[in-house]
Amino acid sequence: MFVIKRLLFVLLVVWSASTITFFIPRISDINPIRERFAELARLGGFSAGELEKIVESYSKAFGLDKPLMQQYFDYIGGVMTLDFGVSLNKFPKTVLMLIAESLPWTIGLILVTTILSFVIGNLVGALAAWPLSPKWVRGVSTSFILFQGVPPVLLAILLIFFVAFKLNILPIAGAYSIGTVPDFTFEFLLDVARHQILPGIALIFGSLGTWVLSMRGMGITIQGEDYVIFAEHKGLSSYTIFKDYYLRNALLPQVTALALALGNVITSAIVVETIFGLPGLGFVLITAIRSNDFLVIYGIVLFITIAVAVLMALVELLYPLLDPRVRQGQE
Amino acid sequence: MSTATLELKNVSKLYRVGKKEVHALNPISFDLLGDPARIITVAGESGSGKTTLASIMLGLLEPTTGQVLYEGKDVSTLSGSQYRDFRKNVQAVFQDPFAVFNPFYQVDHLLEVPIRKFNPGLSKAARRKAMEEALEAVGLQPSEILGRYPHQLSGGQRQRINVARAIVIKPKILVADEPVSMVDASLRANILEALVSLRENHKVNILYITHDLTTAYHVSDSIIVLYRGSVMEAGDITKVVESPQHPYTQLLINSIPWPDLERKWDNQQYANPDIQEISGEGCKFYSRCPNRKPECQQTPNLVPLFPKHLASCRLHPPKADLDAHLTNNL
Amino acid sequence: MKISKLSIALLAITTAFTMLTTSLFAGGHSLAKVPREQTLVLGWSITSPIGVTNPFASTGYTHQEANNLMWEGLSYFGIFNDEEIPWLADSMEYTKSDYTQLTIKLNAMAQWSDGTPVTSKDVVFTFESQKNNNKLPYHANFKQFVDKVTAVDDKTVVVDFKMPAPRFKFQVLTLKFDTGIPIVPAHVLSKVDNVNEYEGGNDMPHSGPYNLVLWDANQKIYDLNTDWWAVKAGRISMPEVKRVVMFNIGGQVGQGMDVVAQRVVNNEFDATLDMRSSVIGNILRQNSKVTTHSADKPPYGYLDWWPNSLWVNTQLEPYSDARVRRAMSLLINRELINEIIYEGAGIATIYPFPLYPGLEKFANSAAVKKLEAELQPGLYDPDKSAELMKAAGFTMNGDDLWEKDGKTVGAVINGFEGIHSDIVPVLVEMLRNGGIDADINFGTDAYQNMADGKAGLYMFGHGASLKDPYTALELFHSRYSAALGTTAGSNRFSRYSNPEYDKLLDEMAPLGGDDPRFQELAAQALGIYWRDQIDIPVIQWLHRIPYNQTYWTNWPTIANPSLGMNGAFWAHTGMLVVSTLKSAK
Amino acid sequence: MINYFKRNISLTIGLGLLIFLILFTLHGLLTVEFKQAYPLAVRPKQPPSLKYLFGTDFFGRDLYTAMVVGVWQTAIIGLLAGAAGTIIGIVLGFISAYFSGLVDVVIKFICQILTPIPAFLIQVVIASSIDKRDVTIITMAVVVFLLSWMAPTLVIRSQVLSMRERQFVAVAKLSGMNSLEIIFKEIFPNLLPFIAAAFVAQVFQAVFASFYLAVIGLGPLREPLLGNTIWAAQSQSAFFNGWWWWPVGPSVAMILILGSLALINMGLDEMANPRIRNKE
């Protein structure tokens, strides 16, 4: 019952997101197909006269000549079957194919950086709130909260300049070295990893502050809980209390925040990917925005929304397994 | 025949949690008469429905069935001056001496609002005077109290302000919901005394809600014992405490370490409360009762056993010639 | 589970997952290793769909993204030598003096990469497709001019025109810059149901020197076809570049060219797309191996065929008033533009065409010089501008902006972020300083606004004339003057209409460019262009391409014109640039 | 009061930073010539000096003036979007909690459904869909606000709901207050720290989002908004050309603004949630 409810909820989220993404672009009368052909014309190679006829015939092919509501229902129907349509820009590639090609890069970057920033951020946050940590540790770790004010995009720009330009110790951009042929060798993987370091750092530090802040708050709350006080009185070592009672209990609610944070991480990843020229979802999205490839824009926005909604639902479903208190409460 | 000041008619409360139904309060009827002023204890462990009963009487909670009548009129339909009259005359002292204070305001707020609302004509000085008098009546120094924020005062001080609030309003009926359970023992007598004097000097009827039979025995005239939403036993306080008829009341009284050395502290083993839950039909105490019998699986009625003494237990045959109405037995 | 163990486990799982998926999607290719000194690395923004190599594929194919290495034309044009370079065709001549018939003779050795010879069948198929398929880019030209295409024999094709077509051979059949058509293999495409949707893929038979061997989102890799017909036919010697890697520099935020520039400095790229003048100067300063078309001297590049004007919608109030257009032109300080944006190089222009040899001759002709002195098209004079605005009924309002009937001149300049983000902000400010309420729009709706005629001003090039001014001047013919509310074609944003002007153009149409009468008429038409300020010419367009000589030399420059082609590897002639590079070792 | 500031260090530092920024901007607004924030006003490409405190850019803007105007415009966007989001949040939150029943269910449901949708993506879609000629500071604020009112609504709603269960509300009722009085006189004052925190969080979000939009070139391009300046510096390859002062100034300003807001937010959190108060 609970599962079905969550599933319905995810469907509703997807429906509202797709409705929003469908209708917003219609408030302007940009014809993306014409824009695309105009760009080709600008690059040369098109004599202009027949452009409108070409645009017209393609509008028909993409169903843009149908009544708005008809388009809407077709679109919603497609979304529900993960059929986001075809790319105008990269026709005949489908949006789903584009997502599938770029997704591994994004997932790789986001997963690694999210986990690292989650682990580091929560540890630092816990130390900031832990009354037994030395004063300077608390001071230093609390100051990590300031990273909240540093947008990853700025970090990315600065890292490229100082680390890649000036020091020249890490690759400037790209997913792997020029001319390398992707295959499953150790060298290639090492090459990929080297290229992920700077974007990774930008993302990790960009999202660290939030974790430190919320963990610190959580930690202070937990300190007052009976079981921590009880553990103290039992005479357990402070390390054990920190790890098993304090950290563990404070961390659990943070897990729920993880899914929601994913939305923000993706936002940052999009811009960071673009700056570093990593061919992930964000790169594809920004390219699509720049070329008015609107089905790709919708597709990626929706895909990310679905991912976040599903992950949130999953976390909610799995949470009782992590926290015995909730498990009991539910039965 | 004077009208009852507050009359409960078949009042019950049912909570639905998902598919589960929880009877917080089974139908109960009784009146609180304006005169003579009395102190009635409602006793029971947590979850017995005491606080639900109090909330319903105060008009803070809608009953699922039945009616609460104030001076003969349904409380839920009152409006205008009638409502204000009800509000003024049916008041409460709550358990938690911190939660009743709005942390945003100085403690004066708690006393000032009812004065302004119920005596709209008073000047500022008169209001101040009323507050000071009430504070003094509960043994507080007004200068030490007024202008302070709640967190700057001790629990005992706050609870006495709480009582002072009742004094300021001078209601006809006061529901005191565990007024001393969160206060230092040394201050309890002080607060209870204040309550008793309200009855003595201002003719206030008090419904004293507690799980503590000792204090109940000291201050009240009669008692209602609740268990899981149902009345187990009721009647004159002395009769009930000294010769409890219902096994549950017996349990309660025997588990009190009475200072009386003659009495033995009964350590009788009671059945595990978890073994068998009877929902709906049957005696609520069935699963824990050491004397349970098959017929106990049918709900017993509250019946008179002695004058001013009722109980709902199938172990005792009712005395048909006695008045079965709860009010008349209190 | 312990927190630490949990996180380590999660990390390991993620890393493994990433690696697995990456390799899955990359698809386990294995290519022979080619050393860096035999590899040419080009930096370019690749937008076309992966795998689309078919020149007839509609939304995908573009010669600019290294597909010019696969597809060849009948002939090429070396702009700086002003000279035709015969290629698939040995010759291509008008065989009637009124330009109504053209005879094409193909090279006997020409063949597709699968061994099939290139024959007249392929040429006829290419031409017939353009004529009959309205989704192909030159459909309009073929429909307007071509009557019939006949294969006389295996290697000879005759094209009969409906009317004199003196520019058809050069404009449509010769590959140069971004125009002209490549010849496609009939034996492949005639079997395809819908040629517009056929991708082609890596293995499509083609005639050019390089085979596409790998294409992912990051890069396209081409390897040399050592069996290339052009070598055997003696057109060219065997190219030294064994492998071409076109690396996708992507559409970075703000089109961050500094990353690209730094990679040139680091010798990662051998050449890239063109740079801003400040950037190219810094590249040269930081790496002495890098050179440009004009060596290490400004303007560090060569003239492109795309001079940019501030196009004006001549039908929209208040731009319909020629005085307002002229007033705006008078506010443009072309000297200052040269100074702040182009480091002193003389880029600012008064012509709607590039000053290539033929056109420079025209611009320097006595008739044109006389008109220039008379009309002063390049004049910067705010006072005169103010006079004209007053004469047009405008008054200066409290914000120092011209106003008429309570409305300022809402002059939003629509431009393209990647190429115009240096010049447009400056133009906006120049107009504002003269009281025109100007602003910037680099949005993706810029083209739409131009085409729909919603806005008044657009920054855009004239991709037209190369040899004579006809095509540039013809852009303003009334036949293209779409009414407001209807859509204007590309390069037809002026919506200008003037019978006097049309008459001149109609008379010029059947004449060859070197005809004296043609020159006379062209000067008159240019005079009207200046007098009426049909648009406001601003700058010539330059290509400042860095040529890195660490691995490759013999780039086409002023000192070493090679075949006379421009150095853009993305132009149709880019194939010749790549094929003639010499190893630096 | 002073003692409280001593205890709540993050609030103190945050407010200090904010006051510094406000003074900087106010002083700037009174002394600079606005025209110098736009191109062709001063000698281009000059490094920081006494004459040009923060240097000048490629287009000939004085970057000190551009910074003053940029911070001011950023503040307008932040305050407008923040205030709009918070007010909507308060109104909907109170309506939801006060009327309960169907109204509450609907409002809560809409908020919950919209929450998982990554707002920035939608903002990008909106910003790239509206007619670019209409992009101004105000439209930026509107775009940013459109999808950011749910969080304050949910926070205020749940706070009102939990307040309503508090005993002092029951007491107020017994003391003769009616529902409206209870909401405004008893509940509302206690929500002030939450509202302040929600407001600061909203402003933070708005500044952040508008900054991102501007950095990717979706802002009002002529204005010297901080993000726009960075966008312009990036597109003219400022770092590569050695004009490091061009992007660094606005970056530092943005970090200071966001940092001060984050600190204030944390300080207010401590104020609103006494358990997080430093136990010293």
Image (cartoon, rainbow, N blue to C red):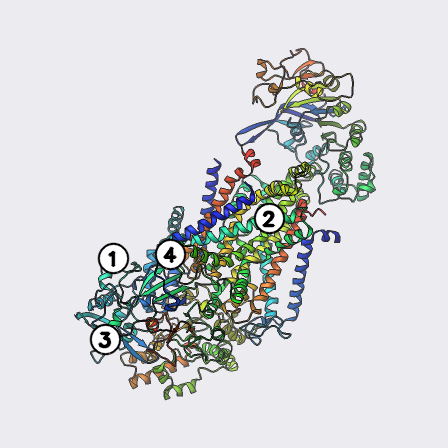
Q: Amino acid at mark 2?
A: Leu
Q: Which residue is mark 3?
A: C90
Q: Position of residue C276 (x, y in %)?
A: 47, 73
For marks 3 and 2, give the CA distance. Answer: 75 Å
Give the camera-side residue of B93 and C298.
C298
Q: In the displayed structure, does residue C265 sit left or right of residue D206?
A: left
Pointer 3 indicates a residue of which chain? Answer: C
Res B38 visible: no
For marks 1 and 2, give the CA distance. Answer: 62 Å
**Placement of C563 over or under D25, stated as above or below:** below
Mark carried by residue C193? 1
Given contact means CB atoms under 8 Å apart, are the residues at marks 3 and 4 in contact?
no
Badge 3: residue crowd in 10 Å (few <14, some 14–19, many ≥20): some
Q: In the displayed structure, does residue A139 sit left or right of residue C375?
A: right
Q: Are marks 3 and 1 on the same chain?
A: yes
Q: Earlier in the sequence, mark 2 or mark 4?
A: 4
Q: In the displayed structure, does residue A145 sit left or right of residue C372?
A: right
Q: Amino acid at mark 1?
A: Asp
Q: Which residue is mark 4?
A: A87
Given contact means CB atoms under 8 Å apart, are the residues at marks 3 and 2 in contact?
no
Q: Earlier in the sequence, mark 3 or mark 1?
A: 3
The quadrant in which the C terminus of chain C is found is: bottom left
Of circles 3 and 4, which is in front? 3
Q: Secondary structure at mark 4?
A: loop
Q: Residue placed at 56% from the left, 53% from the top?
A: A207
Q: Amino acid at mark 4?
A: Ser
Residue C49, located in which quarter of the rendered image? bottom left
Q: Which residue is mark 2?
A: A123
